[in-house]
Image (spheres, rainbow, N blue to C red):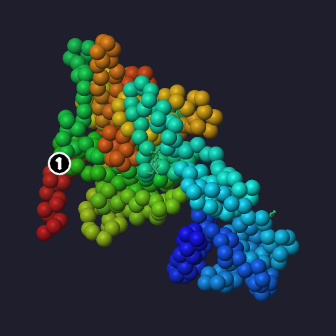
Amino acid sequence: MNLFLLTMATLLLVVGEGTAERILSRRTKRELATPLHVGGIRDPYGSYCQRRGGCCPGRDDLCTVPYLDTICYCDLFCNRTVSDCCPDFWSQCLGVEPPFIGTCERNGNKFFTGQTYKENCNLCTCGVTGRWECEQHACLMEPDIIHAVNRGNYGWKAANYSQLYGMTLDEGIRYRLGTQRPSRTIMNMNEIQMNMDPLTDRLPLYFNSLEKWPGKIHEPLDQGNCAASWAFSTASVASDRISIQSMGHMTPQLSPQNLISCDTRNQGGCAGGRIDGAWWYLRRRGVVTEDCYPYVQPQQTPAEIGRCMMQSRSVGRGKRQATQRCPNTHNYHNDIYQSTPPYRLSSNDKEIMKEIMDNGPVQAIMEVHEDFFVYKSGIYKHTDVSFTKPSQYRKHGTHSVRITGWGEERHYDGTSKKYWIAANSWGKNWGENGYFRIARGDNECEIETFVIGVWGRITMEDMKNHHHHHRRRHI
Ligand SMILES: *[C@@H]1O[C@H](CO)[C@@H](O)[C@H](O)[C@H]1NC(C)=O
Ligand SMILES: *[C@@H]1O[C@H](CO)[C@@H](O)[C@H](O)[C@H]1NC(C)=O
C-alpha cells in the first residue's frame, strides 16, 4: 500500500512538472518506478493502445495515451523493463498475454517484476522468477577493499567517499583522471642536467612548499566528473611557480577551464588531454585566472566542454593580452599569464627534491589503480587487496598531480618510509585535505617517471605593474 502511494506521488510529480522533457528524462531512469499495471491500478478492460490507433516500433517517447492521471506508453521500449506500458500493450502490440508478475523482497518490502533499486554502482531488477538480478560491475567504492586496506598493515587507511559512491570503477577511471600518457617523443625529452654537490646540496628529511612559501601555494582543486587532470595539474603547478617566482607580487590561481575550453587542438577537454599540449598553450597563448574564467563542474557525463570564452593577442616582446572580458558577471582582471617552455627532471628522487626546494612544486604523471580512490591518509602504496578478485576489479589509468614536498616516517624498529607529498584534484575532503602522501624512491605508480618543472614568464615590469594594478583599475 505504501508503495502504491509512493508511486502515485511520483506519477503526480511527473505530470505536475508537465514538460515533455521532464517526462523524457524520467523515462531513462526508472529506479523504483512501479509498473503502472500492478499494485491495484491495473485496468485489464481498458483500451489504450487500441484507442490510440496502434503501436510504435522501437522507442518513441511521444507514443502515449492518457492513463488515469498520467500517461502510458505503446512503444516497444516500454516493454524493456515492464513499467510504463499501457495495460493493453501486450495484447494489442505483441499479441501475447501480459507477462507474469513476480514479486521480490527487500528489507521486508514487496517489489514487482521490473522494479529496480541501486546497490552501490549496480542496478538490481526484480526478475520474473521473483529473484533480484543485479549488474556485476566493480564499484569505485568497494566495501571489501576499504575493509581489507584498513585491516591490513599497508601503511595507509581507506575511506568511503560519498561523492564517489555509486560510481563504477570504469566510470572512476573514465571521469576522474584524464591525462594521456605522453607520446614516445615527449617521453624521450631530455632531462635537465643537475649537478648536485653532496656537501652543499644537503636535503632535509622533511620539506613542504606550504611552509617555505606561505600564501603562494594554491589549495587542491576539484575536477569533479571531468577527466581533465591534464588541465588541473598544469594550471596549479604554473600558479605556484608564478607566485613563488614573483615573490608574491602576483599570486594568480590560473584557470583550468581556460585550458579545457580553449586548448582544444588535439586535446579532449573533459575526456582527457596531454600535459605537453597544455604547456604549449600556456607558453604561446597564456591563460587568465580562475576568478576571471571560473570552473564549471559538468552536470552531465560525458561532460560538455563549453565554448572558448577567452582569446589573447600579442602585444610585443612575447607578451599577450586578452581580447575579451572575463566570462562572468563580476568584472575581474583579465590579465594573461604565460610560462616558459617546461623542462623535464630526471627520475632520481634527490634531483626532484632539490628542484622542489629551490624552485617550487613540480608536475608528475602517475598511474592510478583501483585502491587509490579510497585513500584517506598515510603513505600510499598500491596494495594487493584486489588481486584475488576477478580481473574487472583491477584497473588503472593515467593521471597527473602536483608534488609539493617530501618526508620520511621513522619507525621504532629502525626502518623508515620515505614519501612524497602531492596535491590531487579531487577536492579538499579527499585524502589529507586534498593532498596525499605516496612512497618515494621506488617509482611507486610511476610517479617518478615523468616529472616536469616550469618558469612563469615574468619581467621586472610585471612585478611593478601587478603591484599597482588593483588600485589603478578600481578608481
Ligand atoms: C516483451 O515482454 C515479454 C514478456 O516479458 C517478452 O517475452 C518479450 O520478448 C518482450 N518483447 C520485446 C520486443 O522485448
Ligand atoms: C558509503 O557511503 C554511502 C553514501 O554516503 C553509503 O550509502 C554507504 O552505506 C557507505 N558504505 C559503507 C560500507 O560505509
What residue do we see at 23% from left, 22% from top?
Answer: 204
Q: Where is residue 404 in the image (x, y as percent from the top left)?
A: 30, 35
Residue matched to label 1? 249
Q: Position of residue 75 (x, y in %)?
A: 74, 74
What residue do we see at 25% from left, 43% from top?
Answer: 217
> Closest to the observer: 364 or 115?
115
* Quadrant (top left, top right, bottom left, bottom right) of the C terminus: bottom left
Quarter holding residue 208: top left
| Residue lying farthest to the right in this orientation | 95
What residue do we see at 55% from left, 79% from top?
Answer: 12
Report if residue 173 is visible in the image.
Answer: no
Q: In this view, does 409 lie above or below 199?
A: below
Q: Could you tell me how many numbered marks the image carries?
A: 1
Q: Position of residue 28 (x, y in %)?
A: 62, 66
Please give left or right for residue 424 compared with residue 168 in the image.
left
What residue do we see at 58% from left, 71% from top?
Answer: 1
Quarter holding residue 60: bottom right
Amino acid bearing label 1: His
Q: How crowded is mark 1: few (under 14 residues within 10 Å), some or many (20 or more)?
A: some
> Closest to the observer: 235 or 473?
235
> Closest to the observer: 211 or 369?
369
